Amino acid sequence: MASFHYLTKTRYMQGLQCPKLLWLSINEPELGAETDEATQHLFNVGKRVGEIAQKRYQDGVLIAEGHMHLQDAIHSTEAYAESGALAMFEATAKFETVLCRADILKRIKKEWEIHEVKMSTKVKDEHLDDLAIQRYCFDRAGYPINKTCLMHVNNKYVRTGGIDPMQFLIEEDMTEAVSKKMAYIETNVSDLSKVLTCEKCPVVKPGDQCRKPYDCPFFDHCNEPHKEYSIYELPRGQKLYPIFQKLGIELIRDIPEDFKLSERNRRIVQSNKTGKPVIDEKDIRDHLGTLEYPLYYFDFETINPAIPPYDNWRPYQTTPFQFSLHIQKNKGKECEHYEFLLKEAADPRRPLIESMLKLLGKKGSIIAWKKSFEIMVIKNMAEMFPEYKEQLLDLVPRFWDLITPFQSGDYVHYDFHGSASIKDVLPVLVPSLSYEKLEIQEGGTAGLKYELWLSGEMEEKEWQKTHKNLLEYCGLDTLAMVEIMRVLYCASSTF
Ligand code: SF4
């Protein structure tokens, strides 16, 4: 006999996104992506945000039974409600096929309020569905709900002497907006309860729902990977794809020469057809002509933790913890390498700023890959550390973008696969250098590792290895720029 599955709020949300996602999660979870380190870290941070929210309720009691003991959790909730508890964390109730846990269930006389906690910085439409299913479940289970609220992170909050739960989170009354969702709830519950007991997987074509509102873990199971050199490699090509599909064109090289495209995409087609790069020597020469020596090849690694780890830090503020710098004093001279990454778990910002300002001096181009990011980080630091503001902002006009020739289409190669990312450009232009051999291969992982270290989720021994891996990764980012610059000089006959 098939086992019984309640429609929990997670399953309700899955079912609204896609009934196939709901069905697969229950019946064939092994087909989905495994929980990776980044997702696990997000769960952990979400749990900590929830614990901060609980501190706003002095009289709250925790329904401690875990998800393997939901019947006990339901009984505990009933018992605490009976005994006059004013607020319950993880309160649990069921009604027919629906079972929900509320982050906070608060008593107001004979009625109750639901307070849901989210890590986001604003209310999103999907949060209303989340609140609606809880309201339906608790209301029908005998907890009359008169208010539904959403608490989310306040990204304007600046940490001062520990996290202040009243300032860190903003609460919004969503009762009216949730009421509108209640009009569809019975139909949704009935439809999704049928999916729970359905023997066959619902037939659903992949579409926008595979990424919205959440990345579906079954994406790779349902979606065929795109072929190499296919039309899907054309940058900003979303509007073109259906046209090419209608014309039966699958590969870029089959796009007719007279098809109207942006200049960059036209050159990508040309490169795919000829098997050669397309290079606008003059434009590259003009861009290189704006460089001023000494050259500083510079790259930050950053984190943006939801919970600020130190004082004078805002939630989700993009904050540097590491940099690599190659300095070339004169044309044709070899570079000197400098780097910054603290060994100890301490606030990295002030020592990083001081080291960076000393090394970057007062003149010369600061070369970055996508300078807007580095400039945004510097402006963030200028705001948080006014004593360095002037010196930091003086760096901004010196930034020079190495991505420009690749993003504008002045240097196009079919093997970039339509990308201007340094990770895709480097192996084509400088095959001897590669990220593939490194333990850390992209900035997201670098930031995650550092956050794990700062939050205490990484052991000291593991950190010793990670520290070395981080230095290797960030160092390659600036060395890659040095070598790519050499290629540009050659390609544009600029010596
Ligand atoms: S990948 Fe798309 S179609 Fe497949 S289960 Fe997920 S949302 Fe549904």
Image (tube, grey):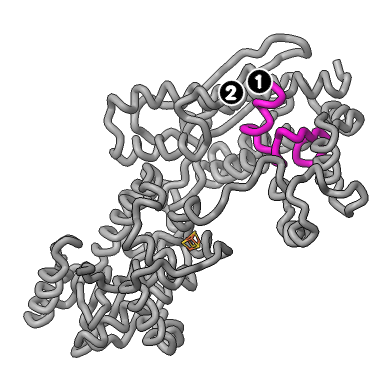
In the rendered structure, the answer to whether residue 221 lies left or right of residue 390 reads left
Work out whether residue 397 or residue 456 is closer to the camera in this orientation and state it. 456
* Label at residue 431: 1
Does the beta carbon of the residue at mark 2 sit less than 8 Å from ligand 1? no
Q: Which residues are magenta?
A: 406-430
Query: Which quarter of the rendered picture does the C terminus lie within?
Result: top right
Residue at the location (44% across, 73% down)? Answer: 16
The answer to whether any part of residue 399 appears in the image is no
Image quadrant in which you'd find residue 393: top right
The answer to whether any part of residue 224 appears in the image is yes
| Magenta highlight on residue 271 | no
Q: Is residue 170 above or below residue 363?
A: below
Whether tag 2 and tag 1 are in contact, CB under 8 A, the answer is yes
Q: CA distance from mark 2 to mark 1?
A: 7 Å
Q: Residues within 10 Å of mark 2 (few under 14, many from 20)?
A: some
Residue at the location (82% across, 27% down)? Answer: 288
Q: Is residue 484 above or below residue 442?
A: above
Find disc 2 in the rendering and name its residue: 434
Q: How many numbered marks does the figure carry?
A: 2
